[in-house]
Amino acid sequence: MKKKIALSLSALIATGLVAAEDLNSMLQEGKFDGYVRLHHINPSTSDTVAITGSFIGGKLKYETGALYGLSLGTAMYTSHDTGLTKWDYLTKDGYNQVAGGLAGNKELPADGGRFNNYTTIGEAYLNYKYSKTSAKIGRQPFASPMTTSEVTIIPNLYEAGVLTFKEVDGLTIQAAYLARMMYGTRATTEVQLIGDGVYGIVSGAGFVHSKPTEGKERFYTMGEAAFGANSGGIKDNKNDNGVATLSVEYDKGPIKLRVWDYYAQDMFNTAYADIDYKMDVSGAKLFFSAQALHQKDIGDFSTSNAGKILSADRTVTDISGKKKRYDTKLATNGEIDAFFWGLQAKAKMGDFMLNAAFTQNTKGHIIDPWGGNFGYTSTIFSRDENRAETDAYKLGFNYDFGTLGVKGLKFIYNYGAYKSDVETTATYTGATRNAGMGSHTEKSDEHDFMFRYDSPDVKGLWFTLFHVERDNDTRDYKQSHTRLVANLNF
């Protein structure tokens, strides 16, 4: 009997030692990665908006090795002023313009009205992988057409469960549930500049970020992110649920096809698809693409407080925020109903790549509150193609200097033009509101000039220097903007 007990204890101890060794190996096989990134706006060559701003930050991530297919990961994100931001810089009209799209939530006036530095635990997840199938739950980035925006320093992050199936060559099937999200640094740009304030919810950020002290630095439910934190009774109307997504992607040979569906319970459903086809003709590489999106509200959304928010008058002002221009509605009856399509062609000939695209939104505004930037005609500071009754086109090219002896250097130019037929409920003459339905046409355009250098000697080191010239009809201003971005992945 004692011998059996001794053997049993020996087995337990051995088992424990094996587990401990495996846990040690799990930690020892873990990997660190991340990036350090600097954004510096040159005040001397920038005008009207985001005149000043200089921030540095990035990501530090650690993921363990796998134990029986299980691994753990966490990542810290941070963004800090370099000390070169001119916080007291005023425009000729006397108002302050600092690049909020580089920092955290704006602090209270008692703190000087500055945008604050911040650090956050943006990722914390459990990942299980078996063969080519994985399941990941927790805080994480989520890449998809309706949730991925341009990244300044910190991306949009989500509390989600994601199941990914890749057992069939060239085929990826993914199901996910997004419960909560935290906006990244660029969300301020998407609301105030790209969305002109009023159209922010169709340009990548929701109404929760319409308040300067909300939207970043903590996680919100998807309904709160879209329509504001319990704004006007969101919780009472149950527009506070998560977003379920299902996607199928096929990428094999000359064809890449993606189909996505986003079901936001008690809010709206978005169906998106695109296809890419590539071919070689007489030494040139040709690429053809098409995309389509349909969006519709669900159930009694139009009569909920969230629907009422969309059907309320919203006032468009000039860039200073002092002069009222017109009133409009994001959804006349609180109903969401949008159809969007686009075509794109690219041709690579030697060191040149040419591109042309056209998109059209034929119905209502696309509600795009969770970071989407899917349109072929999107440019650095313009996403007007998401607005109702808008035709847009984009022309551009890039040149690779490799054959001239400067390996890794490219010059990129893009021109985007946007024409929107705007429905108004009122116009303004000075401070006088002239009520009554009307319409007008807005024509805006943007020129993007960029030098991009990817170091051939240091992996993950790149620099981007870009200059933007933008003529914005919505808020009646011209923008010049020069920025240096430096990045090191590790």
Image (tube, helix red, strand yellow):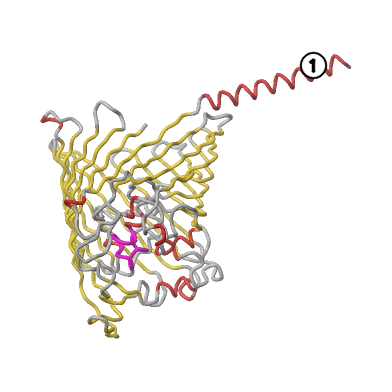
Image spot of residue 261 (x, y percent): 43, 56
Residue lying at the far right of the rendered structure: 1
Q: Residues within 10 Å of mark 1 (few under 14, many from 20)?
A: few
Residue shown at 24%/65% (left/top)?
A: 94
Residue 295 on image: x %, y %: 39, 64
Quadrant for residue 411, please give it: top left
Say which of 314 and 398 sits in front: 314
In the figure, 42 relative to 437: above or below? Answer: above
x, y (%) of residue 70? 56, 34
Residue 23 is drawn in which quadrant?
top right
Percent across and percent down for residue 144 are 39, 49
Using residue 243 as the reference point, say whether residue 250 is left or right of it.
left
Quick one: quadrant of the C terminus? top left
Residue 222 falls inside the magenta stretch? no
Asked if 152 appears above or below 24 in the picture, the reply is: below
Q: Disc 1 residue type?
A: Leu
How many numbered tags mark residues here?
1
In this view of the protein, which residue sits in the foreground, 183 or 146? 183
Q: Quadrant of the N terminus?
A: top right
**Picture quadrant where residue 199 is located:** bottom left
Q: Vertically, is 180 above or below 284?
A: below
Q: Residue at the far top: name it.
A: 3
Secondary structure under the numbered disc 1 in the rendered image: helix
Residue 196: say if magenta. yes
Residue position for label 1: 7
Numbered range of the magenta stretch: 190-203
